[in-house]
Image: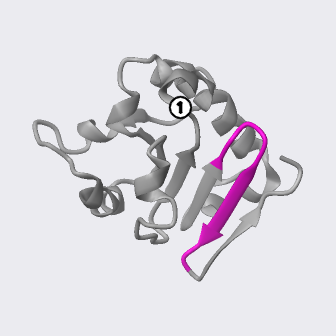
C-alpha cells in the first residue's frame, strides 16, 4: 500500500503510480475520512494500516523527525510543488533498487529522495546513509 500525503492531491500522482504498482494507492485522508489529519498524527495512523509506504514532499516536518516503526516506510521527496510530477518515477527507481526491492526491505526505514540522491536511515541507526547506485 502506498499512501500519499494530502498535499499531493489533484496532481494525478496516484494514477501514475497505479499504472505500475500492483497494490493500493491512496491518500492519507482516505485512512481517516472526514477528519483533519495533522502531521503529528500521521505515524500513528500509518501504524494502523497494512504495511504502508507514506510519500510526502513535506521534508521539513518528516525527515529525521517522524517516529519510525517496523510497520511502515516513510519516503520524503525533496521536490517543490512544481516538480511533484517526478514522484512516480523516483518511487519506481526506489522500488527497483536491491535494498528497497521488497516490502520487507522497506519497512522501518525513512528515505529522502531527490533526482540525484537517495538517503535512508532506520530506527536502530538514525545516521543517514547514501543509497549506492542511485
Q: Is residue 99 above or below residue 6?
A: below
Q: Residue at x 78, y 61 (%)?
A: 130
Regarding residue 51, the answer to whether it shows in the image is no
| Res 132 seen here | yes
Segment tinted magenta in the rendering: 113-123
Assign a secondary structure to mark 1.
Answer: loop
**Residue at screen point 66% across, 62% down:** 120
> Is residue 100 or residue 77 the one in the foreground?
77
Residue 117: x and y in percent read 76, 48
12 drawn magenta: no
- Residue placed farthest to the left in the image? 34
Image spot of residue 19 (x, y percent): 59, 20
Image position of 19 (left or right of 40) = right
Residue that label 1 marks? 80
Tell me if residue 116 is in the magenta stretch. yes
- Is 85 on the left-hand or right-hand side of 44? right
In the rendered image, the residue lying farthest to the right is 133
Relative to 69, residue 2 above or below: above
**Of the pair 64 and 17, the residue shown nearer to us:** 64
Amino acid at each position: 500500500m502506498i499512501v500519499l500525503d494530502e498535499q499531493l492531491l489533484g496532481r494525478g500522482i496516484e494514477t501514475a503510480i497505479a499504472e505500475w504498482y500492483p497494490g493500493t494507492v491512496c491518500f492519507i485522508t482516505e485512512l481517516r475520512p472526514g477528519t483533519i489529519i495533522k502531521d503529528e498524527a500521521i505515524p500513528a495512523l500509518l501504524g494502523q494500516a497494512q504495511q504502508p509506504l507514506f510519500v510526502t514532499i513535506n521534508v521539513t516536518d518528516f525527515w529525521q523527525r517522524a517516529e519510525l516503526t517496523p510497520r511502515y516506510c516513510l519516503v520524503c521527496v525533496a521536490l517543490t510543488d512544481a516538480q511533484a510530477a517526478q514522484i512516480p518515477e523516483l518511487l519506481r527507481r526506489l522500488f527497483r533498487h536491491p535494498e528497497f526491492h521488497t516490502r520487507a526491505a522497506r519497512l522501518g526505514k525513512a528515505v529522502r529522495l531527490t533526482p540525484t540522491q537517495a538517503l535512508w536511515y532506520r530506527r536502530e541507526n538514525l545516521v543517514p546513509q547514501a543509497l549506492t547506485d542511485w
